[in-house]
């Protein structure tokens, strides 16, 4: 059984930082492309970042323009964990953040349908 469990969300003031974690089980993390999405209140789920497997244990990160330079995605395969380091947080970053896994590198990174597994999400609230 595949499980993705997000943690690390919470309430933070604008300008602050949070580190989200996604603990995986039931998949071989090394062979999967991993991504973070978020769903702001009353809005659609949107792409945040992807750690795309390009071959072997080589991965390339890509980011949504809205988080580029502020967020960083990484992984520790031996611990079956993926991370999202979030800095300079702003109220517009308030959302439920989801971890997603794909056995194949997505053709369209932002397309939620291209991901095989999802976590339940962790809430991030950024106060002004």
Image: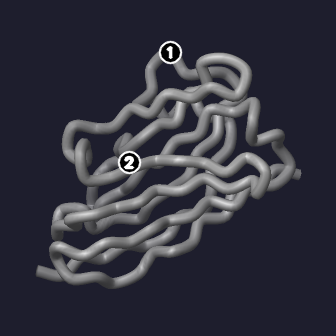
Label 2 Cα neighbours within 10 Å, binned few <14 / some 14-19 / many ≥20: some
- Left or right: 2 as drawn, with respect to 87: right
Query: Which numbered circle lies on residue 107?
Result: 1
Q: Earlier in the sequence, mark 1 or mark 2?
A: 2
Mark 1 residue element: loop
Q: Position of residue 51 (x, y in %)?
A: 52, 36
- Left or right: 83 as drawn, with respect to 23: left
Above or below for 119 versus 77 = below
Query: Which numbered circle lies on residue 45?
Result: 2
Q: Position of residue 80 (x, y in %)?
A: 75, 53
- Left or right: 72 as drawn, with respect to 118: left
Q: How is the image coloured?
A: one colour
Above or below for 5 versus 61 = below
Which of these two is toward me, 51 or 97?
A: 51
- Residue 17 quadrant: bottom left
- Write the residue at 55% across / 21% down: 106
């Amino acid at each position: 059984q595949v499980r993705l469990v997000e943690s690390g969300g919470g309430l933070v003031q604008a300008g602050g930082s949070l580190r989200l974690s996604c603990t995986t089980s039931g998949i071989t993390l090394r062979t999967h492309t991993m991504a973070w999405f978020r769903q702001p209140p009353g809005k659609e789920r949107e792409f945040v970042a992807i750690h795309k497997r390009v071959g072997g244990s080589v991965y390339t990160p890509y980011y949504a323009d809205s988080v580029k330079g502020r967020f960083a995605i990484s992984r520790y395969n031996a611990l079956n964990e993926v991370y999202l380091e979030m800095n300079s947080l702003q109220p517009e970053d308030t959302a439920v953040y989801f971890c997603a896994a794909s056995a194949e590198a997505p053709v369209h990174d932002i397309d939620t349908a291209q991901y095989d597994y999802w976590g339940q999400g962790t809430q991030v609230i950024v106060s002004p």
